[in-house]
Image (cartoon, grey):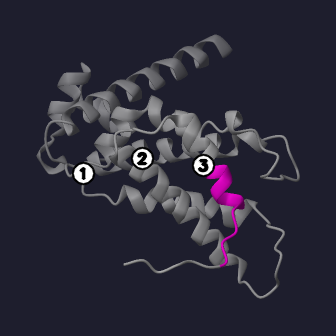
Amino acid sequence: MIVIETYVDKRIIRSQKAIKSAFLHCLAKKPFHEITISEIVRLAEYNRSTFYAHFESTEHLVQSIIDEALQQMIVHIRAPYEHMKEVDMRQLDANAITVFDYFLQNETLFKTLLSNHLQVDIRHKIASAIENLFIEQYEYELSTSDIDVKWLYIYRAHGLAGMIIRWIEEDFATPAHVMAEQVLKLMTVTTYKFTVTE
């Protein structure tokens, strides 16, 4: 009985992966609204009934792809301190930060999701996912008591999301390990003044 369930699970995973891959292949070439389910299943070598066994619509398919990508992003953000209760960012090893490696390894996926072919604000979704992580799971030790910590979480979450998105848009020009080093420094840097230049 267990063997059968394992076999079915693997078959479901395989068909979902094939359908998602076929859809992303289509999305890289044409706008979302021009892609049909028939086209997706033909490329994936399945039929329409298999598609509807897993997804209600192409919109549901897109959301499933995005949700899975963001879940994996959160796993990688948490990786450096996964087994820690208290985290001192000054002591974290930049080599343990894998979130930039994750985006680099999934370059085609994120470039496709950020393309004009998909009318979904993936930038906002990335920022919101990080923001929710920070608000739900972090409790910062602050050097002052007059800051509403909610805004600190939002400020840092959207800052990290902005770095990631700009990095993708710049075609990953900066090495992933340098990005990891920079994000640690940015999370701990303090600035008190600036000079206005012409």
Q: Is residue 66 left or right of residue 112?
A: right
What residue is rendered at 45% in x and 59% in y?
125
- Between disc 3 and disc 1, whose residue precedes? 1
Q: Residue 79: where, in percent of width, then height? A: 70, 39
What residue is rendered at 82% in x and 81% in y?
144
Q: Residue 174: where, in percent of width, then height? A: 45, 39
What residue is rendered at 47% in x and 25% in y?
13
- Between disc 1 and disc 2, whose residue precedes? 1
Count all numbered tags in the image, as a single digit. 3
Instruction: Determine which residue is flagged by label 1.
Output: 118
- Between disc 2 and disc 3, whose residue precedes? 2
Instruction: Name the outermost residue toward the front.
Output: 198
Q: Amino acid under label 3?
A: Gln
Instruction: Name the outermost residue toward the bottom.
Output: 146
Which image quarter holds the N terminus? top right
Q: Is residue 110 left or right of residue 150?
A: left
Extent of the magenta region: 183-192
Predominant SS of the magenta segment: helix
Q: CA distance from mark 3 to mark 1?
A: 30 Å
Which image quarter holds the C terminus? bottom left
Instruction: Determine which residue is flagged by label 3.
Output: 182
Q: Residue 146: where, in percent of width, then height? A: 77, 88
Q: Residue 11: where, in percent of width, then height? A: 46, 18
What residue is rendered at 28% in x and 35% in y?
24
Q: Amino acid under label 1?
A: Leu
Instruction: Determine which residue is flagged by label 2.
Output: 167
CB under 8 Å between discs 1 and 2: no
Image height of 195 relative to 109, above or below: below
Viewer-nearest residue: 104 or 117:
104
* Mark 3 neighbour density, 10 Å: few (under 14) some (14–19) many (20 or more): few
Q: CA distance from mark 1 to mark 2?
A: 19 Å
